[in-house]
Amino acid sequence: MGKGGSIRNRWRGLALALAACAPVAHAAGGAAAPAVFDWFEYTGRDAAFEAPLPAGHYRNPVLAGFHADPSVTVGPDGTFYLVNSSFTFFPGVPVFKSTDLVHWTQVGNAIERPDTLDFDGLGVSRGIFAPAIQYHDGLFYVVTTAVDSGGNFFVTAKDPAGPWSEPVWLPGIGGIDPSLFFDEDGKAYIVNNDAPAGTPRYDGHRAIWMQQIDVAAGKPVGPRKVLIDGGVKPEENPIWIEGPHVYKIDGWYYLSDAEGGTGPQHSQVVLRSRNVWGPYVPYERNPILTQRDLPDDRALPVTNAGHADLVQGPDGSWWAVFLASRNYDVRHYNTGRETWLLPVTWKDGWPVILDPGQAIPYVAKAPSFMRGDASQAPNTGNFTWRDEFDAPAQRREWLSVRVPRHAWADFTATPGALSIHPRREGLDTLGNPSFLARRQQHLVFEASTALARPERGIAAGLAAFQNEKYWYFLGVRRAGDDGTEVFLEKRAGEGPSEIVAMRAAGPAQALKLKVSGEEGDYGFAYDAGDGRGWQWLARDQDGTVLSTETAGGFVGAMVGPYARDERAP
């Protein structure tokens, strides 16, 4: 790992200088000395990404790792813009742009000011659900739901890179998954998933509602109406009709929705009407996308496919972005719900993403308007991503768990290094731990860092995190008079965390730490700089505790630098 001797020598000199001049951690109640990290590196090596791309093809998923609930629109210059759910991670609602639907660059976040929303007290998979993006009359709109923290709202921007407006709250619109539809006559409508009228007939019984909205005033107007009650086959008691989008194409209003829950039974269905208010008639060959009809034991399985949004390219072709997951051991997936891309085929006036029984391809023929080379890194494929922490601000790949109320990540205090001011909050908090999180994007990966030995009373290292109840912490702390210990801490469920392994590392002033994963097997290693190189602290650890199947919720595993203040209050 690393860039050779010059980097190692620079780091070793920096670590010794810090050890000599860093302040001792203050007395209980005062600020603790920061933990200092020199670099972070992430490498992914998935078998699904090893095959070379033929000319004119692209690689799926187009956004690997936790990028759930994609929504896409076209700006006035033909550029595509896409947003994803962020739940309680911050900054929230990442905004990507692309000229070809294949190569994406993050340009901003629709939720980026710390005082916009408050996620304290919420589990990781609450917060921002299923944002939808639309462009209309000079403005970009993102409408979404802050679950358990305010309800439905929208924000606007002239430039998707920001700044985005303060939230315009919609207290009259209940439920989740709102999206906007702007009709040709200038009227705007909001559609979303909410409970049906009256008492639900069964668990998962939902409805799709619509109401006209005055976006200038930020208020719904007129009556709400149910467009779908239950799903496209209500007699079969379908569950979780959600994620609706309305499109007007060739005189038809198309209503496309996810159905079946966002797990293995997930699917996409479509209905249409000549009137925006309906009645909407379902396509007789629904679903237009699913993977639930494929065998569990297939190679490199893709599951959970659904929650699609459609967009038209400059050549008249139609495309769908949607979520799906890459599994191992049948049901486990640590990389979360990812963003995939497939062409839409029109059959007798109906849009079809994938015929029944077809597997979602990892390599597909690209749009005729694709630009750029075959590489889609660092969004997908096998690659190495490294942060030398030599920029004055946090890179967009880094997130925090919930909204930081204090600036604990400092990229300028020590040139070429990240200083984390450790907070007392552990990884099991419902607040904001001092953890800088990056998505795990591969089933087979390594993540490593170099850090100075923290001051007494501070633990620092690498966290591999799914949510507040499921995580690993590979940490370093001082021990004895001048010793260093490396430890692995684990939490896997409702009980308290436990120390899985611990080892003395001598008087090391600077260490390197590494987390490796291969599907459900994780390993944790350290290099104390004593000439012995990498030493395994623990191997064959259960990585399924970082899978969504085990931990629950809607996110994927994250990895990154973490520091914790362990001093007595």
Image (cartoon, grey):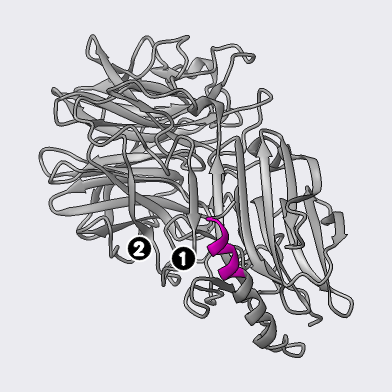
Sooner in the amino-acid sequence: mark 1 or mark 2: 1
- Identify whether 361 is placed above or below 534: above
Circles 1 and 2: CB atoms closer than 8 Å: yes
Q: Which residue is mark 1?
A: 117
- Identify whether 414 is placed above or below 536: below
Where is residue 247, by image quadrant? top left
Residue 533 picture location, percent across and down: 73, 53
- Crowdedness of circle 1 by 10 Å Cα count: few (<14), some, many (20+)? many
- Identify whether 141 is placed above or below 348: below
Which sits in the foreground, 514 or 145? 514
Label 2 amino acid? Pro
Give me the residue at 37% from left, 57% from top: 109
Say what secondary structure mark 2 lies in. loop
- Identify whether 67 is placed above or below 459: above
| Residue stretch rendered in magenta on the structure | 3-11
Residue 50 picture location, percent across and down: 49, 26
Specify the label residue 167 is tagged with.
Answer: 2
